[in-house]
Image: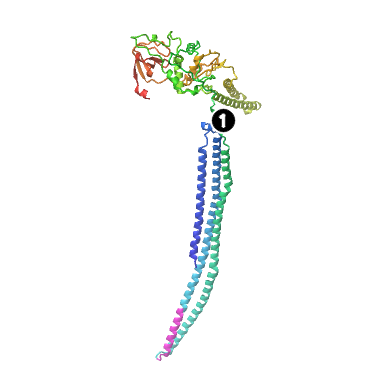
């Protein structure tokens, strides 16, 4: 009698199943999203190809990190497997089962409603026959009473009495027929009702119960599958985690430290003790005939900045010391023409009385000469890297040269393979002219051969520099010119004890060991490295108030009334740096010119 409640309950069961399907579907979406995020995370932290970051991953800790990223990628793959298996083994299977379940439920309840309608029809038929039997019995009683009344009345004719009697008999017969019909329908209904409640409905309810139990079992099996899908990937996830642990255990701090040492080992020796400088007495340092100023006069200075002498210790000292020496000619500016001539200034760089000039003044004089102005400025800005990497410390230079040689050898091998391929193709064309013209490959073959020859010459050049660094060549007896490829066979004279106070272009200190008899460097290479920089911008203009001869090194001659560009204002030493054109620039006494500074240029 709970047919309607069972219908609601079975619908609720289907709703629960669909809700579980939706739950698993959302879980698969979460797994896919999680896997995607893990992959993106792993990709984000992977080193970029051909970048400086990729070079940093040579250390064991970084390699372990890369392994961790790769394992996380595999870890993400397992979550994708979870999503795929749940979708195929649970969602698709349950969705199909839900459709079958709905169809079976619909059929069962259709049979139930059919049985219900049948029993209701039998009940209505029974009620109808019952009401007819009741009506016929009443009609028979009234007809009998009317007959008896007519028979007792003496005023009624015999014919009327006979008619009433016949009518009473007819009504009585109809009542008997209705009674028999009602009895028959009642028996039939009772039988149908018994069948309905004891056979039809129990069978239908049994089918519904079995259907519902199968649904319950199916949802339980799906939950087990849900757990099994997760459990199946646990061993692989465990291997991923074991891989991360193994990568972490492979980290070797000693090896990483050694790599850092190899990467940054310069090959320089530590600086020696700094000598005491007694400022209580005039500085008198003997400059040998082979000093920097004499070398400058020959146009081949002996000091090569950024060179590779054994005693070089520049990296240990700051840059600003040398720069302060070279900002001006380091001598008092001459007074205006009313006083002594500018060239007669005491202690001037050209004064014949000054036989033992401080080396810092000589060095300044050497570096402020016109050909050196641009190159020194380039150094200040960090000029272009020379081809032979001479700007690097010895050990780093050797590594760079070796790397360059290896790259050139690979390119040579690639070109040779291409040449061999063209040669084979040409042989094929010679044997089978219909396939192509052999002469058409001659130009390509010649071009490849030229490329190989160029690469070999380039390789020989870098191998010569590498051999020089590694000490396989004589000690610079025949230097290779960096840019032009020419060789300079000059052997510069030795710099004596005064060289102990020499300063390098980057502002550090260079001290030669006493047992070393020579310093072989080329200043022309310094020019090659640094002369490519752009000139300093003008910060204003100036007008010459007096004529200045500019006889000293680093100065420039001006004529009274001449207008020039100012590129460096007076820093308090009495000199202003000016330019006439792109190639002529130098210092003039500030008192000889009237300066008009461009405020915008100065601010910028």
Q: Main secondary structure of the magenta part?
A: helix
| 259 inside magenta stretch | no
Q: In screen coordinates, is 202 left or right of 335?
A: right
Q: In the image shown, does 262 or 489 lie closer to the viewer?
A: 262
Judge the density around disc 1: few (<14), some (14-19), many (≥20) Cα neighbours within 10 Å. few
Q: In the image shown, does 493 or 483 lie closer to the viewer?
A: 493
Which residue is the site of mark 1? Answer: 258
Q: In percent of the image, x 43 and y 8: which residue is there?
A: 353
Q: In screen coordinates, is 534 left or right of 193?
A: left
Q: Quadrant of residue 77?
A: top right
Quadrant location of the C terminus? top left
From what the image shows, is residue 28 above or below residue 211?
Answer: above
Q: In percent of the image, x 49 and y 72: which residue is there?
A: 123
Horizontal and vertical percent position of residue 136: 46, 80
Horizontal and vertical percent position of residue 350: 43, 10
Q: Residue furthest front?
A: 280
From what the image shows, is residue 69 above or below residue 16?
Answer: above
Q: In percent of the image, x 52 and y 36: which residue is there?
A: 46
Q: Is residue 163 visible?
A: no
Q: Quadrant of residue 151?
A: bottom left
Which secondary structure lies at badge 1?
A: helix
Horizontal and vertical percent position of residue 345: 39, 10
Q: Is residue 270 visible?
A: yes
Horizontal and vertical percent position of residue 135: 45, 79
Magenta residues span 134-154
Q: In the image shown, does 73 or 173 lie closer to the viewer?
A: 73
Q: Residue furthest bottom?
A: 154
């Amino acid at each position: 009698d709970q047919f309607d409640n069972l219908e609601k309950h079975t619908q609720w069961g289907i709703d629960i199943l669909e809700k579980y399907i939706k739950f698993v579907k959302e879980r698969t979406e979460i797994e896919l999203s999680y896997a995607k995020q893990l992959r993106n995370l792993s990709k984000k932290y992977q080193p970029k190809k051909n970048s400086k970051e990729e070079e940093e991953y040579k250390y064991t800790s970084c390699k372990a990190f890369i392994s961790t990223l790769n394992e996380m990628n595999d870890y993400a793959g397992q979550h994708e497997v979870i999503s795929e298996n749940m979708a195929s083994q649970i969602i698709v299977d349950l969705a199909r089962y839900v459709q079958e379940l709905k169809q079976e439920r619909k059929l069962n309840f259709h049979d139930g409603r059919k049985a219900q309608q049948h029993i209701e029809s039998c009940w209505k038929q029974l009620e109808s026959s019952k009401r007819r039997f009741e009506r016929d019995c009443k009609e028979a009683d009234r007809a009998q009473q009317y007959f008896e009344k007519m028979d007792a009345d003496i005023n009624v004719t015999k014919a009327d009495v006979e008619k009433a009697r016949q009518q009473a008999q007819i009504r009585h017969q109809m009542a008997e027929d209705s009674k028999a019909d009602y009895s028959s329908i009642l028996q039939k209904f009772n039988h149908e009702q018994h069948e309905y409640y004891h056979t039809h409905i129990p069978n239908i309810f049994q089918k519904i119960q079995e259907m519902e139990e199968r649904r319950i079992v199916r949802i339980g099996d799906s939950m087990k599958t849900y757990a099994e899908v997760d459990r199946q990937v646990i061993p692989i996830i465990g291997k991923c985690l074991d891989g991360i642990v193994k990568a972490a255990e492979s980290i070797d701090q000693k090896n990483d430290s050694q790599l850092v040492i190899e990467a940054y080992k310069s090959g320089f020796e530590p600086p020696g003790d700094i000598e005491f400088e007694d400022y209580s007495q005039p500085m008198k340092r003997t400059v040998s005939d082979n000093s920097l100023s004499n070398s400058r006069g020959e146009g081949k200075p002996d000091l090569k900045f950024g060179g590779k002498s054994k005693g070089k210790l520049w990296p240990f000292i700051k840059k600003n010391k040398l720069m302060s020496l070279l900002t001006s000619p380091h001598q008092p500016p001459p007074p205006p023409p009313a006083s002594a001539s500018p060239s007669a200034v005491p202690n001037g760089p050209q004064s014949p009385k000054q036989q033992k000039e401080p080396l810092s003044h000589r060095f300044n004089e050497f570096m402020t000469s016109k050909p050196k102005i641009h190159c020194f400025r380039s150094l200040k800005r960090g000029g272009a890297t020379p081809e032979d990497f001479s700007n690097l410390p010895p050990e780093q230079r050797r590594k760079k040269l070796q790397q360059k040689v290896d790259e050139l050898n690979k390119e040579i091998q690639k070109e040779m393979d291409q040449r061999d391929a063209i040669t084979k193709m040409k042989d094929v064309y010679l044997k089978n002219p219909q396939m192509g013209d052999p002469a058409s490959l001659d130009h390509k073959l010649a071009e490849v051969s030229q490329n190989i020859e160029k690469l070999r010459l380039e390789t020989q050049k870098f191998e010569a520099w590498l051999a020089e660094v590694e000490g396989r060549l004589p000690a610079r007896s025949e230097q290779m010119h960096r840019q032009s490829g020419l060789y300079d066979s000059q052997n510069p004279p030795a710099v004596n004890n005064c060289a102990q106070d020499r300063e390098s272009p980057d502002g550090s200190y260079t001290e030669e060991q006493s047992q070393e008899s020579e310093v072989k460097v080329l200043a022309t290479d310094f020019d090659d490295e640094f002369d490519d920089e752009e000139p300093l911008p003008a910060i204003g203009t100036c007008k010459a108030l007096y004529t200045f001869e500019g006889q000293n090194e680093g100065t420039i001659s001006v004529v009274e009334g001449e207008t020039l560009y100012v590129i460096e204002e007076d820093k308090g030493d009495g000199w202003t740096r000016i330019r006439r054109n792109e190639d002529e620039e130098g210092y003039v006494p500030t008192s000889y010119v009237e300066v008009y500074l461009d405020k915008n240029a100065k601010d910028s």
